Amino acid sequence: MSENENQKYNGVMKFTSKIRSYGEILVFLLIAAFFILLAYNIRDSLSPIIVFIVLLILLIPFWRYSWGRVILGLTLLFFSIWVVQKAGYLIVPFIVAILVAYLFDPLITKLSNRSKYMPRAVAALIIFLPLAIVVTLLIILLVPAIIEETQILLETMPQSISKMFDSIITALTNIEITLNSVLPESLNIDLLKDRTEITNYLIDRNNFLLKNISFPFSFETSNITTMFSMMFSYFIIMPLVTFYFMIDISNIRKRLIKILPMRWQSTIGEIMDSSSKLIINYLRGMFILSSVLFIVFFLALSVTSSKYALLLAFIRGLFNVVPFIGPFAAYLVAVIVGAATETVWWHGIIKMSIIYGAGQILDTGFLQPNIIGNNVKMGPAAVMFATIMGGAMFGFVGILVAVPLAGIISIIVNRYIDKYYNSRFYRKQN
C-alpha cells in the first residue's frame, strides 16, 4: 500500500473513531437526560443509593474517556459524603481503628521482626490485649464519673448562675449608691437600668441553652435501632476492626501503592512512609500530652478544692487536640463553672485564671517541646494559619486534621523543592 493510501486510510480511521466517540457521548447524554427526567418525577421516593448504582452502570462503559473518569470520581466523592453525613457515627470506629493501628504499627513490626517464630498476628495480640484492658478500665472508672458530674453541673447551673447574677447586681447596686452619694445630683448614675428584665432574659436564655446542652447526656431516646447500632459499632466492631488493622495495615498500604502506576510507586511510597512517621509521632505525642495535661489539671483543681475537677480536667485534656482554640475554649468553660460555683463569683474567675494560666505556661514552655518536639516541623504562625484555614474550609474536622495535614503537605513541597535545587534548570548558570 502506497504512502498516499496509508494517509487516506489513517484519516478515515481517525474520522471513524471520532464519529464513534461522538456517537457514544451523544448516547450517554440522551440516557442521562432521560434518567434525570425520570429521577425528577419520582424524586420523593428515590433513594441516593439507587441513583449511585444507576450512575455507576451508566459511567462504567465510558471509563476509557477522561471525562467519564472525572464524573465517576465526583459521583464516588458525593456518595461518600452522603454516607458520612447519614451514618457518620458508624464510620468513626473505622477511623479510630486505623489511627490506633497506625500508632502501634512500628511496635508491632519491631516485635514480629525480632523473632522469626512470632507471627505478626501474635505480636498484634500482645499489644492489643493490654490496650483493650486499659481502655476498658478507663471507660468503667472515668466515663460514669464524668457523666455524673456533667449531669449534676447541668442540673445545678441555673441556680448557680442566678445566684451569681444576684451577687453581681448587689455589688453594682452598692457601687451605684456610693457614686450617687459622692457625685452631684445632676449626675444621677443608674448602673442597673432595667436590671430585672436583663436578669430574667439571661436566666431564661441560660435555661434554654442548658436544656439543649444536656440532651446528649440523656439516655432516653425513641430510636432504639440507632442506639443499638452505635453500641454495637463502638463496643464490638471497633475492637475487631482495630485488631484486624493492627495485623494487616502494612499489607494494606503495600496493596494501595501497588494499584498506582509503576513509575509513581517509588515516589508515593517514600512520601507515604515519611507522612506515616509524621502522623504516628504527632498522634502519639498529642495523646501523651493530653493525658499528662489531664492529670496535671485534675491534681491542680482537686488541690484547690474546685468543684467538678474531673470534668474540667477531662475537657482540658480533650480540647488540647485543637491547637490554640481548644485550650482557650477549655479555659472559658472553667471560668464560667468557677464563677457559678464559688461562693464569691470573682474568686472563681481568679482561681481558674491562675490555674489555667500556669497550666498553659507549663504546656507551651515545657510539655509540648519535650513530648511533641519537632515531630511536625512548623512554626507557631504556620500552625495557627493551618488551624484557621482548616476550620474555615472543613469545620471542626478540619481543625483536628489541620496540623498533620499541613505537615504532610510540607513533606511533599520540600521533596519537590529538593528536586528543583538538584535540577539542571536550577544549576545551569549560563
Image (tube, helix red, strand yellow):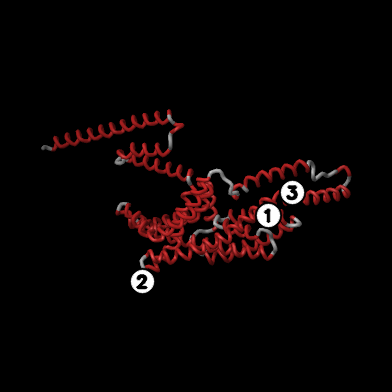
Question: What numbered label is drawn on residue 162?
Answer: 3
The correct choice, above or below, for 249 with respect to 36 in the image is: below
> Residue at horizontal 43%, vertical 60%?
102
Q: Distance between the residues labelled 3 and 2?
A: 66 Å
- Res 208 → quadrant: top right
Taking the view exactly as shown, the residue that stands out farthest to the left is 1
Question: What numbered label is drawn on residue 337?
Answer: 1
Q: Which amino acid does label 1 sit on?
A: Val
Q: Residue 167 at what x, y percent from top left? A: 78, 51
Question: What numbered label is drawn on residue 115?
Answer: 2
How crowded pointer 2 is (Cα within 10 Å; few <14, some 14-19, many 20+) is rated as: few
How crowded pointer 3 is (Cα within 10 Å; few <14, some 14-19, many 20+) is rated as: some
Q: Residue 66 at what x, y percent from top left? A: 33, 41
> Residue at horizontal 69%, vertical 43%?
205
With 203 as the anchor, is 269 left or right in this view? left
Q: What element carries label 3?
A: helix
Q: Residue 137 at what x, y percent from top left? A: 54, 63
Screen quadrant of the N terminus: top left
Q: How far apart are marks 1 and 3 (CA)?
A: 13 Å
With 268 as the anchor, is 99 left or right in this view? right
Disc 1 or 3, which lies upstream in sequence?
Answer: 3
Q: Is mark 1 on a helix, strand or loop?
A: helix
With 213 as the anchor, is 28 left or right in this view? left
- Res 240 → quadrant: bottom left
With 88 as the anchor, is 355 left or right in this view? right
Q: Which amino acid does label 2 sit on?
A: Ser
Choose between 175 and 345: the one closer to the eye: 345
